[in-house]
Image (tube, rainbow, N blue to C red):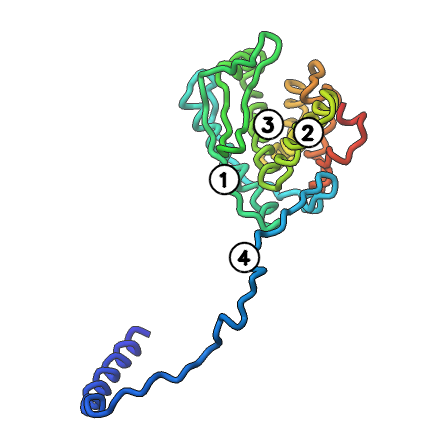
């Protein structure tokens, strides 16, 4: 191709030299008009803002997508006492979750920015002795943050050989909020909470959102660990075998939705918004 391009260039130069006298003595003719006058076909409707896309929490296209196939995830060994180890573990978990959920985003023709993942030594002002945050997702920043003092406190009650799978499930839960944001679900949930008619209605919406994230954590857990292993039972024992939470649902329902994500064949298994009240209490 390069040879043909060079030949074409030589031919062009020769033709130019041969035609100089013609160009000099012959007035240039005006170009004949061609194409279409865009003024005659201008459509002022194109200036209008696009219509708002309505997101149906109960009948969302997401629910028709097959569960993503497993991916190989070689997580580094986690030393919960080391900031650097936590950063490496959380970063690699995020990379694996990006890869796992990519086919779902592709099926929905979505190209969301990938979330950043960080760790912090700062606890939240809302933390109490009985309830505190292990990690959180900020949709406006596209950021997942792991709260190290709190996860280290919980780690004291988790055996060393079970810690990595437990904290992988935590990362899967927070990443699920990113999936909710990318599909428009999270924004609608926030709006429903803001306009709720009562505190009870607001809490119900929050539980449906959090239990869906727990279900998607089950999707991540199955996709990144041995499906024939005991990861599901380990995570349910440590996270969902305790007390009931107004914001995240009862222990029984948290266990139910994590298992639904682990066992489902399509993401419809995580449709908490269409579930009966008893399953999101």
Number of residues whose C-alpha sits closer than 10 Å to that of mark 3, classed few (under 14), some (14–19) or many (20 or more): many
Q: Tell me the element at label 1.
A: loop
Q: Alpha carbon of mark 2 to alpha carbon of mark 3: how far? A: 31 Å
- Decide if residue 149 is on the left or right side of residue 226: left
Mark 3 or mark 1: name the one nearer the start of the chain. 1
Q: CA distance from mark 4 to mark 3?
A: 46 Å
Q: Nearer the viewer, residue 188 or 222?
A: 188
| Residue 250 place in picture, x, y as percent | 73, 19
Q: Earlier in the sequence, mark 4 or mark 3?
A: 4
First reached walking from the N terminus: tag 2 or tag 4: 4
Q: Nearer the viewer, mark 2 or mark 3?
A: 2
C-alpha distance separating marks 3 and 1: 18 Å
Q: Which mark is residue 195?
A: 2
Examine the rendering and report whether any part of residue 166 can be seen. Answer: yes
* Above/below status of 55 relative to 276: below
Q: Pointers 2 and 3 in contact (CB under 8 A)?
A: no
- Residue at 58% of width from left, 9% of height from top? 128
Discs 1/2, front: 2
**Residue 130 in the figure: left or right of residue 73:** right
Q: Position of residue 134 (x, y in %)?
A: 55, 19
Identify the residue under disc 3: 169
Query: Which label number is shown at residue 47?
Result: 4
The residue where tag 1 is placed is 114
Q: Earlier in the sequence, mark 2 or mark 3?
A: 3
Can you tell which of label 3 and label 1 is closer to the viewer? 1
């Amino acid at each position: 191709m390069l040879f043909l391009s060079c030949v074409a260039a030589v031919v062009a130069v020769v033709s130019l030299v041969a035609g100089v006298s013609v160009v000099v003595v012959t007035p240039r003719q005006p170009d004949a008009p061609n194409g279409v006058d865009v003024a005659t076909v201008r459509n002022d409707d194109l200036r209008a803002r696009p219509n708002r896309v309505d997101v149906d929490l109960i009948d969302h296209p997401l629910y028709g997508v097959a569960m993503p196939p497993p991916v190989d995830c070689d997580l580094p060994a986690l030393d919960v006492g080391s900031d650097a180890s936590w950063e490496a573990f959380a970063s690699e978990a995020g990379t694996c979750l990006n890869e796992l959920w990519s086919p779902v985003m592709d099926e929905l023709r979505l190209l969301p920015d990938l979330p950043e993942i960080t760790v912090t030594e700062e606890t939240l002002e809302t933390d109490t002795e009985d309830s505190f945050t292990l990690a959180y997702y900020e949709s406006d920043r596209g950021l997942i943050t792991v709260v190290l003092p709190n996860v280290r406190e919980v780690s004291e009650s988790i055996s060393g050989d079970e810690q990595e799978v437990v904290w992988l499930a935590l990362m899967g839960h927070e990443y699920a909020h990113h999936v909710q944001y990318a599909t428009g679900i999270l924004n609608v949930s926030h709006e429903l909470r803001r306009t709720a008619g009562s505190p009870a209605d607001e809490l119900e919406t929050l539980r449906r959102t959090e239990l869906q994230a727990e279900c998607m954590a089950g999707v991540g857990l199955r996709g990144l660990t041995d499906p024939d292993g005991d990861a599901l039972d380990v995570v349910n024992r440590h996270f969902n075998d305790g007390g009931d939470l107004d914001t995240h649902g009862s222990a029984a329902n948290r266990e139910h939705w994590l298992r639904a994500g682990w066992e489902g064949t399509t993401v419809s298994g995580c449709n908490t918004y269409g579930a009966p009240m008893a399953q999101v209490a």
